[in-house]
Image: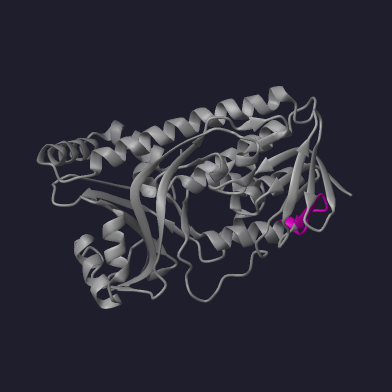
Amino acid sequence: MQQAQVCIVGGGAVGLTLALGLAKKNISVIVIDSGCEPQPLADSFANRVSAISLASQTLFESLDVWQSISAMRAIPYTHMDVRDQDSFGKITFNSAELDLPELGHIIENDAIRFGLFVALQQQPSATLCFETRYQAIHQTDSDVLITLESGMPVMAKLLVAADGANSAIRTQFKMPLTFWDYDHNAIVATVKTQQPHNATARQIFLDTGPLAFLPLNDAHHHSIVWSTSPEEAKRLMALPATEFNKALNVAIDSQCGLCEVADDRAVFPLKMRYAQQWLSGKVVLMGDAAHTIHPLAGLGMNLGLKDAASLITCLTQDGEFASMRTLREYERSRKLDAQKHIAMMQGLKELFEGGHPVKKLLRGVGLSLVDNLGPIKTLFAKEAVGK
């Protein structure tokens, strides 16, 4: 039998961040993940990237892992350009206006996972079990028993479900879920552009959904997230690369010059998920298992990392380990923050979606007002960078 104070199911970036934070506080932790262990970055850019906020950077710095993560093709961005297609509305801001060295970093998700994985290998309090599945979970008032497919039992004081949007643990423990379909699919790809990105993150709101151009660690490469209707996503994915490039160039209004997409375009549906209950006895939800939101503001990864930071704080307080009071404190604070961001994303999506003339006028006036009113613009910018 293996024993640990905390068992984390899910070896994504959020689960590994929690594991590292706890291990550094000498809390024994075991991570179980059915996938392969994280690998060094490939030569080509990966499709899945995150805009890591300054708050998330601070968390990684506190875990002494930021330097190694940021060394793996991370790039700071210093400018943001947000505009509405076919409208006069836009807002731009830069790090100098906020007296900051940068607004955040664009980092491949694989780099975050690998940096955390390497750091965890140096922690005697951490046990990593990749390519490992569990077959049963049972809990008592004080413990959780996880039986692996190999037959090995794992006993823990707390089980953290970081097993993704379709969390099997959330389903097993019947934690109710509120969800709706955003009626959007997101196309992700790496794009080579004629013009350099100049460390600028761009987002343009089209009638069918937002298109983000995120700078990569090469002056002429971007990672794109194109959120659009399922029908339009299907049409765009079926286009030959040359035709897709033309459509992309029109959508971004040639802001970056001619675009050349890589061959590995991918698409996935977008859904809002919110667990009404994050805690069942000694089983707690975190990250995508607890919430998923629209990627239009790039908040998903950062929201999950805030979960990890909160749970690290709660579990390292003095007193009884993983007490119900402590776990309720985590659930209450993180549910409130998740609700706020879900509502904000839904409001933005509804405001910026569609080509109705009145909506376009409201968007244009609103963005222009924010861009020209210093204090409001500063508040908007600080929210965007996680300050």
**Does 10 lie within the magenta span?**
no
* Most distant residue in the top direction: 325
**Does 122 lie within the magenta span?**
yes
How far across and down, in percent of the image, does residue 252 sit? 23, 61
Q: Is residue 269 left or right of residue 128?
A: left
Nearest to the observer: residue 292 or residue 126: 292
Residue at 72% x, 24% y is 324
Say if 269 sits above or below 25 in the image: below
Say if 93 sits above or below 74 in the image: above
Q: Quadrant of residue 111?
A: bottom right
Q: Quadrant of residue 250?
A: bottom left
Q: Does residue 151 show up?
A: yes
Residue at 50% x, 27% y is 336
Residue range of the region highlighted in magenta in the rendering? 120-128
Nearest to the observer: residue 214 or residue 189: 189
Residue at 89% x, 49% y is 1
Q: Does residue 258 show up?
A: no
Nearest to the observer: residue 151 or residue 106: 151
How far across and down, in percent of the image, does residue 265 sit? 39, 69
Total tally of numbered discs in the picture: 0
Indicate how the structure is coloured in the image: one colour
Say if 151 sits above or below 350 in the image: below
* Most distant residue in the left direction: 357
How far across and down, in percent of the image, does residue 14 sit? 60, 48
Q: Is residue 4 left or right of residue 99?
A: right
